[in-house]
Amino acid sequence: MRYLPHSDTERADMLAAIGVGAIDDLFTGVPADKMLKGPVNLPRRKSELEVARILGSLAAKNVPASTVPFFVGAGAYKHHVPATVDHLIQRSEFLTSYTPYQPEIAQGTLQYLFEFQTQVATLTGMDVANASMYDGSTACGEAVLMAHRVTKRNKAILSGGLHPHYAEVVETLSYMANDRVMRLPADVKAAEDIIALIDNETSCVVVQTPDVFGNLRNLRAIADACHAKGALLIAVFTEAVSLGLVTPPGAMGADIVVGEGQSIGNALNFGGPYVGLFATKSQYVRQMPGRLCGETVDAEGRRGFVLTLSTREQHIRRDKATSNICTNSGLCSLAFTAHMTLLGSEGLARLARINHAHAVKLADMLANVKGVEVLNQSFFNEFTLKLGKPAASVVEALAAKKILAGVPVSRLLPGAGLDDLLILASTEVNTDEDRAILVAALKEVL
Amino acid sequence: MLNRQGRPSQAGESGMNSAKTFTGNRALEQVEPLLFEIGRLETTGVDLDEPQAFTPRLGGLERQDGIGLPGLSEPETMRHFVRLSQKNYAIDTGIFPLGSCTMKHNPRLNEAMARLPGFADIHPLQPQSTVQGALDLIAQLKEWLKELTGMPDVDMTPKAGAHGELSGMMAIKAAIIAKGEAATRTVVLVPESAHGTNPATAALIGFTVKPVPARENGLVHIDDVKALLGPDIAAIMLTNPNTCGLFEKDIVAIADAVHEAGAFFYCDGANFNAIVGKVRPGDLGVDAMHINLHKTFSTPHGGGGPGAGPVVLSARLAAFAPLPLLEKNGNGFALCESEKTAEARGAHPYGRITAFQGQMGMFVRAFSYMLSHGADGMRQASEDAVLNANYIRAGLRDLMSQPFGDKPCMHEALFDDQWLKETGVTTLDFAKAMIDEGFHPMTMYFPLVVHGAMLIEPTESESKASLDLFVAALRDLAMAAKAGDTERFTQAPRLAPRRRLDETLAARKPVLKWVPPVPLSEAAE
């Protein structure tokens, strides 16, 4: 077996050095009647070539985004990631290292985490960010738990514009932890009056912008209303590129900002691994979940970085910890930081403008198609269409024509009576030809 | 694993490291500033054309300020991060014997497979008819995990080990709620030797944690469990093999007693690498166990994630697995994403633990590992992992003390600090001296039940020559400690990119992001 260095002679020598006769003499702690007599009922080992053939044939049964006109968003986005990024995250020293528990020999990881935290805090307009979470949805769940700790209340209000998967994650956590949650009905046109619902028992209000239907939401009034009642505003985003063009939540009064960072540096990966972004105000840092990297000095006075404020964490606090989280999304945060470094403010702002321009162009083209209504007053790179027929069947019909046209709302909210709605995203990867193909095909299937 | 606060070593004579240079660089070791100190606000490393003029539709929410993030050109970016990488220790540079972390070789075939466009470039919400190969892979991986664990079902969605614990414990809570016992079954038993994630997970979803004492032999005793069992117990969370590197010999009796009391048995699968293909958790009475794909099945640790933590479930819990559910019908594979549809099929998902359907990138890598090893290779890997740990144990047992006596361990060897008594050297000092010898230290001060614990897990990836050098170096260090050469330890590391770092300062005055230096004009005021 190519990954196992020992020869049988070496194995025998090692057993002799240990002082036992056979390998199973080292398994004497296992109840003898539970030991398997031989290998389990699975195929035997395979060469690289054989494995590549098997996995290659499975991969070939899928339709990659880059091979078709592609307009799918709703929480994950197809962007171009520079080749440099994927090279860097495959550096052995990043790929095959552990959580930086021994900081003297992990300054590479620690320094990029410090850079990542700085980038995320700056981008969101917040004081401080952690070293990342599993993804946007779990970051959202953790943000609600954190708001409960800060306010010592346990009632969360979720906007109807919050991504339904995110809302379900919060609902599940709340149900299991015996917390209260009020989830508003789907709010396609950003018309809900969430402020009226905030009371003195509310711990937090969770609002997404751009929301799952693509609408941009002004958070200022909601933030003021939250603060008047002693509640926190949690702002959520799923499209990090939007922060290149849109007022960041921190500038609109958000107390906690969480989001999905996949758009910057990371591939679609069928849903994971992604990278959750989590930022807040300085005064709440000790209630924050997740890993934090901080600056310090070594014994010779040189700047260095360490994991810090770990007295919040499970390995010290056990059942009193702020969260059970044990890792971050290290390599995905490196991808984010490397891509963000390549972009810089200039590149990110321009990338965001291109995305917005493409979406505006597409929305205008689609608005002219008979039987199509664009529902959004405002949007970044994603918007919602009302079609004359079920969006799911339209999407299937377009998929048959090798066009991946978006996410039917019925996929996210089955049974909500929104079957004729379709969410479309348009990023920098779409060409004029892609848009023309989509519009022409849509006319055919409608 | 646990990084106990250490005393910073003294400045001063530090051997060859003290040579001064003009740049501060030392040959291959380059000083690398923060990117904010070398980047420029007007610089970008990507070529993008400004779009043609258009009317924005941002509803008046256009960003008013600059973003404030400096950029670097492509060559500068490459150099910045490559230089940073060179300040990291990694499996590919040497033995990484962190106990309970399973730092084994990460095959690059798996990286290549995960990057096939058919896996990496597909969207979680694109039509299911266009991702049949991906769903097929998940279904096959589930079958392999079921066969390896002897369990009837797998929840594939959790994003990491601790997330898997949470998902498994939620399934247990859902089952308890379904039985109408939520008000009474509120306590979870957790041994003192458990990973911190276990009690943190139980507490997160409202359980009260009650510790199970560890006996002098490092094992949980059936009598101690029985004494705690009652109508208030929801579950026991047991790690097996346990964090002392031992197989819990009473495990079947414990499972039986737990079930008899109407409770559930959660097994922490962090140490599964010791027993793959040798013994199956399903044969031991386990109800739920997460599998760290990033440990046992070699998906890269990546400096702290991303991982993946699928949870195998017993027949008692299978119906409560979270959404989405993967099913096969006449048209191929399909994801059941709605509670209503699931209920119609007799399932009672407890809810949803994450957006989308889990860590596909990790699934591809883990499946590539499994296909490569096969049933025979995985069994051999576990045997070699156990062999290697015992070989190290045998090589050090005359110099270092074993807390539970001289007997075989599973895939990790545990020592305590008895043997360092009166040397003036602590476990932390010893670990730091290992750094100077070119090794990553073992896990220190964990498990908590052992004083000054040193937990060594070499994994099956180390050759005999590598183990021989490691043992010889640790013997040399042990003899130096006993001979009173304390400087070699208290001053360590001398040769790493940094000496010991002041963690107290970092926690007392947290600096968690870069801030521009104060302009001179303001500083003068």
Image (tube, coloured by chain):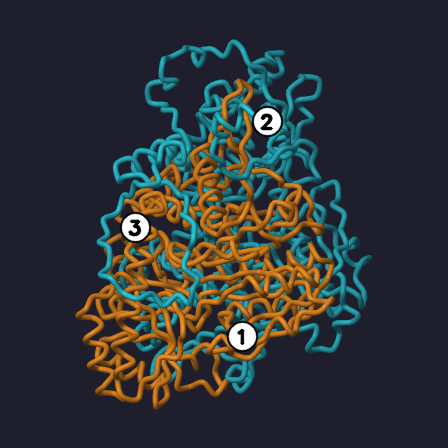
Chain colours: A orange, B cyan
Foreground: disc 3 or disc 1? 1
Give the residue at mark 2. B502
Vertical arrangement, residue B390 with respect to residue A34, above or below: above
Residue depicted at 74% across the width and 45% down the height: B214
* Quadrant assignment, res A94: top left
The chain carrying label 1 is A
Foreground: disc 2 or disc 3? 2
Name the side, left or right, on which A147 lies relative to A328: right
Callout 1: 10 Å neighbours few (<14), some, many (20+)?
A: many
Q: Nearer the viewer, residue A8 or B75?
A: B75
Name the side, left or right, on which B510 lies relative to A55: right
Callout 2: 10 Å neighbours few (<14), some, many (20+)?
A: many
Q: Position of residue B488 (x, y in %)?
A: 55, 15
* Quadrant assignment, res A254: bottom right
Q: Which mark is residue A160?
A: 1
The quadrant of the image that shows the N terminus of chain B is top right
